Image (tube, helix red, strand yellow):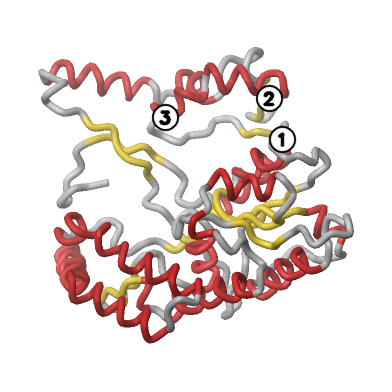
Amino acid sequence: ASIDGKLYGIYRERPLSRQGIVIRKDWLENLNLDTPKTLDDLYEVAKAFTEKDPNQNGKADTIGFTDRNDLIYGAFKTLGSYEGMPTDWKEENGKFTPDFMTDEYMNTMNYMKKLRDNGYINKDFPVTSKTQQQELFSQGKAGIYVGNMVDAVNLRDDATDKNMKVDILNRIKGPDGKERVWASGGHNGIFAFPKTSVKSEAELKRILAFFDRIAEEDVYGLMTYGIDGEHYKKEEGNTFVREESQVKSWQTDVQPLVSLVGIDKRYLKNKGDAVRTKYEELEEDNQKIIVANPAESLYSETASERGNELKKIIDDATYKFILGDISEDQFKKDVEKWKSNGGNKIIEEYEASFKKSK
């Protein structure tokens, strides 16, 4: 969240990793399949969900994965972390390598390409929105969703088949038998206070006092859970339940305030919804297997100015490879294009920033 090593606001704390897999538990049961534990298992489940009539309606109307046009929060990056891909950058003895220059990135592209070539994932995922991706799952057309594990709640609640059973997973073994998941920076933007609108130091201190106050348990609880008895019911052991009748009032009265909450404290644990409870447990478990980005706190002027522009070269090449439009050699040519157009400068600047930080 820093700019040139300096912080100019209060960061909005968020979990380091909420990524995992939502899967149709009832489809696994219908096909007598075990919960997948490895990438190979996951592939075989996707194949079975496509070819073996998991909804038992006698029609070939299902696929394995549902994905969208997002290489970060869609399936690609999470599957890549299971494959052993570094989170954005790999650092070794002070030398930095972007994730797309690793074997694991190529293996992930091949995994996704194989899924698409065989029809085990929606073939139009590069132009599929998140809403469309979720509809494929909720409408019973796909059985595997990779992304934020908490999405399992809405995927289930929005299901056309109210008997749908979902499960969530966070640990998938890679080819080396290890379990990993990529980590974000632990924040979702910052609250900044520009001098154009905050005119004096006294006013700034008053605003900072407000943020200090809403981090305390009583106000935090009010802005996160709502009013006990109206939006939820507090129970023993710092747990709470939210009845179906309270969900809508919570969404209207309380949920809009969540964006103001900077610190993620969670005084109460949800025990009224088994899926949400498991999500909270697995999100906590993810902290044990996260792979951090070693360049997260480093500064590169070129990355700040042209990073998104250069990233588009790689994103486009990644999609083209998965779609079968370019070969591995052609992908590597696009990597060289990234390097010559500023990528090498980014590498140099991160290495210099890393050295300076030591």
The CA span between labels 2 and 1 is 8 Å
Position of residue 32 measured from the top left corner of the image (x, y, whole percent): 87, 65
Q: Are marks 2 and 1 in contact (CB under 8 Å)?
A: yes
Rendered residue at 55%/60% (across/down)? 124
Dot 2 or dot 1, earlier in sequence? 2
**Circle number at residue 259:** 3
Q: Nearer the viewer, mark 3 or mark 2?
A: 3
Q: Amino acid at mark 3?
A: Ser
Residue 175 falls left or right of residue 349:
right
**Circle number at residue 273:** 1
Give the quadrant of the C terminus: bottom left
Residue 316 falls left or right of residue 161:
left
Position of residue 309 measured from the top left corner of the image (x, y, whole percent): 25, 59
Dot 3 or dot 2, earlier in sequence? 2
Rendered residue at 69%/62% (across/down)? 64
Q: Nearer the viewer, residue 215 or 37?
A: 37
Rendered residue at 36%/20% (across/down)? 213
Q: Amino acid at mark 1?
A: Asp
Q: Under tag 3, what secondary structure? A: helix
